[in-house]
Image: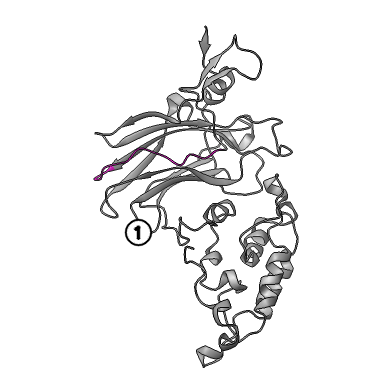
Amino acid sequence: MKKVVLALAILVLSTPALADSNGVTVEVNQIGDTNEMYVGYAMNNASDVNRPRAFGLVIEVNDANMGQPYGFDPNFYIYPGSIDINVDAPEGQEVNSWGSPIADYNDPNDNAIMEMASLYYPTGVSSPNRPPSSGILFKFGVDKTSGFSVDIEEDAQRGGVVMEDIDHPDVNDPGYVTLVDWPSAPTDCFPSAHPDYSNWVEVGKPDCWCYERQCHGDADNTHDGAANENKRRWVILADLNILSAGWNKKRTDMTTEEFDAAICADFNHDHDGSANTNKRRWVTLDDLNILSSNWNKKETDAGVNVDPNCLEVP
């Protein structure tokens, strides 16, 4: 029985993308002060239609022991280095094994080579299956919480970081793909164990979601100025104005700056369910209801509704 590697996925990874500051950033980061690390990507402009197609990356840990990668992004589920295809099988049954995104894992040398790609149709901005503008590609553990570093590089042999449209003019500009080592990357302020963490990553890791009362309707981390902290009102007109500016708007209805401001009024950290990430509405009726329930209440009136507990993990 003849077995071959999926030709299309190989073709996708065969042409490396060079780069430009308007492109995509891939960074390795520590999650809080834990011994858990992640490798994530984000479009520098969330509305950019030229999304990543595939990643060929080398991860090397210095001065610590690296655990085997896990928690792989389901949007990049094609593993060209190990996928096993039977071309003689009936249509729809061609895949014998999806393989693994870990092309090589060298425990004694504390490094891993990762190879993972997307495969969706139709291509382009109209596809409901295209990967989002940001996400966590995979995670790995280390045996320390400090005193180590992690380097990330493109694996040229596996194509490095490949964009959907490799003929896009910007792809050929230096700096289109930016790789950020750790500890160069900032530490996440939003806990990775929180159920809303993946949505926080998708919308660009907004600092405002890390406000301790944001999930209760406080979009800007300010109050009414009352000297008595027990009588301060945290959900006030300024928060309503932020919500109004982004009310029921799709991501494509706003500039990047407008979206970054409006997302602070997404108090329930969820969207309207649209499959197209660019057309999702993040500031909706659920958020208005949260704001309304705590509107203009003093802390002594609202109690737990405005307690500084939004970063607690349920």
Work out which residue is located at the far top of the displayed protein and give it.
1
Left or right: 91 in relation to 204: right
Q: Is residue 141 above or below residue 255?
A: above
Q: Main secondary structure of the magenta part?
A: loop
Instruction: Look at the image and give the residue range highlighted in magenta.
Output: 62-74
Residue under circle 1?
33
Query: Which residue is depicted at the point 44% across and 58% down?
Result: 188
Q: Secondary structure at mark 1?
A: loop
Residue 124: x and y in percent read 70, 35
> Identity of the amino acid at label 1?
Asp
Indicate whether residue 82 is drawn in magenta: no
Q: Is residue 263 above or below residue 99?
A: below
Residue 104: x and y in percent read 36, 28
Q: Is residue 302 above or below residue 44?
A: below
Is residue 299 visible in the rendered image? The answer is: yes
Left or right: 125 in relation to 214: right
Q: Is residue 138 above or below residue 216?
A: above
Residue 194: x and y in percent read 49, 58
Q: Dot 1: few (<14), some (14–19), or many (≥20) neighbours within 10 Å?
A: few
Work out which residue is located at the far bottom of the displayed protein and give it.
227
Query: Which residue is depicted at the point 28% across and 34% down?
Result: 107
Left or right: 162 in relation to 128: left
